[in-house]
Each structure stands twice: as structure tokens, then as C-alpha cells.
Amino acid sequence: MLMFYFDSGTTDSFVNPAFAKELASKPSEMNVQLYVTTPLGSTYYTNLVFRNCPIQLEGRILPVDLVQLNIQGWDVILGIDWLTRHKVTIDCERKLVTFSTSDGERVTFKGSGC
């Protein structure tokens, strides 16, 4: 089962290298090297991105550009780029994430974690 994490505090969306091996698309090199510092102070760098990867959420296919990064505990982190693209609203109290599909349909995902 794919482990998503929604993170409005990061500008990009990321994919774990182990999960990236399962993606149908191939990575391309970015024009720049991206340096990412985690909240714990670790710094990682990458220049690989998987463009327009289809991800499935609540039975809908939604594209995302995934930057490969050595993240732990998650397959995919969906950042502000994806959240903005799909007009996401997050209800933290009820653990609901509502997004728009390309045809304008509003769909709600219910989280199960704490």
C-alpha cells in the first residue's frame, strides 16, 4: 500500500528511491541541484525528477512531479506544488484532505493516522 504524506511546508513533492524503482516513468535530470534540509537538520541533495507521474488517490488518477529524495517512512510526500495544482484543502481536526480533479470534481480523502 502506497504511503502518502501531505506536507504544506515543502515546496516540492518527493519520492523515496526504493519506491521510485516501481514507477513506470523514468527520471530526468533537473537543471539545478536541489538541496533539502529536513526539520532534524539533515541535508540531502538531488537532481532527479519524475515528471507527470500518475498517482491514484480515492480512485482518481492525479499527476505529480516527484523529486527523488532519500526520505524515510513514506513512499511519496505531496508538497505545496501538488496541493496547489489540485486546489487542496486540509481539515486537520477531521483528518480530511479535499482535492480537485482535472475535470473540477471535488473528492475527499480520509486519513487514518494520528
Image: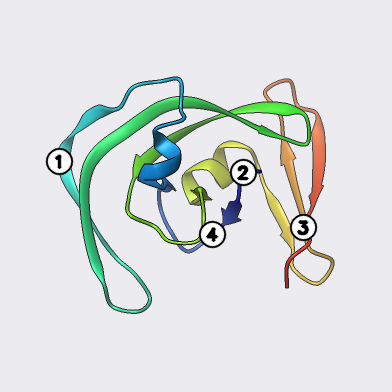
The residue under label 3 is which amino acid type? Gly
Q: Nearer the viewer, mark 3 or mark 1?
A: 3
Quick check: 82 above or below 37?
A: above
Q: Which residue is mark 1?
A: 32
Which quadrant does the C terminus fall into?
Answer: bottom right
User: Which amino acid lies under the numbered mark 2 shown in the image of this protein?
Assistant: Leu
* Quarter of image, res 10: bottom left
Classed neighbour count for the residue bearing mark 4: other residues with Cα under 10 Å, few (<14), some (14–19), many (≥20): some
Which element carries disc 4, helix, strand or loop?
loop
Which residue of the protein is positioned furthest toward the left in this rendering?
32
Label 2 near label 3: C-beta < 8 Å? no
Quick one: SS at disc 3? loop
Q: Which residue is mark 4?
A: 7
Q: Position of residue 38 (x, y in %)?
A: 34, 70
Q: CA distance from mark 4 to mark 1?
A: 23 Å
- Mark 3 neighbour density, 10 Å: few (under 14) some (14–19) many (20 or more): few
- Residue linked to disc 3: 111
Which residue bears the numbered disc 2? 2
Q: Looking at the image, tell me whether mark 3 or mark 2 is earlier in sequence order.
A: 2
For the N terminus, which image quadrant?
Answer: top right
